[in-house]
Amino acid sequence: MNKEIMNDREYCLSILKEYTKNESLLKHAYAVESCVRAYAEKFNEDSEFWGNVALLHDFDYEMYPSLEDHPFKGSEILREKGFSEEFVKAVLSHADHTKVPRETKLEKALFACDELAGFITAVAYVRPSKSVDEVEVKSVKKKMKDKAFARAVNREDITKGAEELGISLDEHIQFCIEAMKKNKLNLGL
């Protein structure tokens, strides 16, 4: 396996863009990447590797959106391209339906950030400025109680993700907001 490809953001970005054309899905990948990279730095882990796992966690979703296919098709593609089992397993573990257990900090961080990054984005879009700068923990938690708001986002996964990371929900939300603020231009927020 080639460690260089897994730490090469430009290469991983080219894979993402080859399979994903939808701007919202691309921005979701960047948002999750921002949060997971920040956790890698917090935990003194390899931020390039972690960030690229996050960047590619949903790269197959646009082409293979069904539960039978996503992220299974993507994991096959990544293996064919020479990505390590550690990388592939992290991608597989981000979705409960795969039944792949989350055991590493990376796997737990990816799961914890996936739904939350999407939800923070949705909260930012309803702010007057449409900016993540206006998003606060209390507004995210208030919107989490509104079942009609961003109804596709699984609130249980957000809560479970923070628990699996061993971090309070408030701290996790604040951490991800701050991570997304640092990359707000890329995220369109």
Image (cartoon, rainbow, N blue to C red):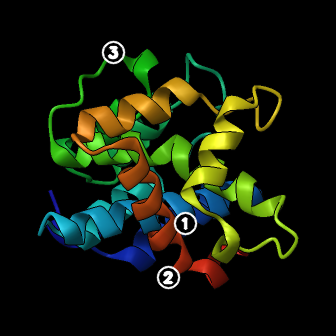
Could you tell me which residue is drawn at 73 percent across and 75 percent down?
188
Label 3's element? loop
Q: Which quadrant holds the N terminus?
A: bottom left
- Which disc, if any, is residue 182? 2
Q: Nearer the viewer, mark 3 or mark 2?
A: 2
Q: Nearer the viewer, residue 47 or 123?
A: 123
Query: Can the viewer see residue 20?
Result: no
Residue type at mark 2: give it: Lys
Residue type at mark 1: give it: Tyr
Residue type at mark 3: give it: Lys
Label 1's element? helix
Residue topped by disc 3: 99
Could you tell me which residue is drawn at 55 percent across and 24 percent down?
69
Dot placed on the residue nearer the N-terminal end, 1 or 3: 1
Label 2's element? loop
Dot placed on the residue nearer the N-terminal end, 1 or 2: 1
Could you tell me which residue is drawn at 26 percent across and 53 percent down?
82
Image check: 89 left or right of 68? left
Q: Which quadrant holds the C terminus?
A: bottom right
Image check: 158 left or right of 143? left
Classify 10 Å Cα crowding around label 3: few (below 14), some (14-19), many (20 and above). few
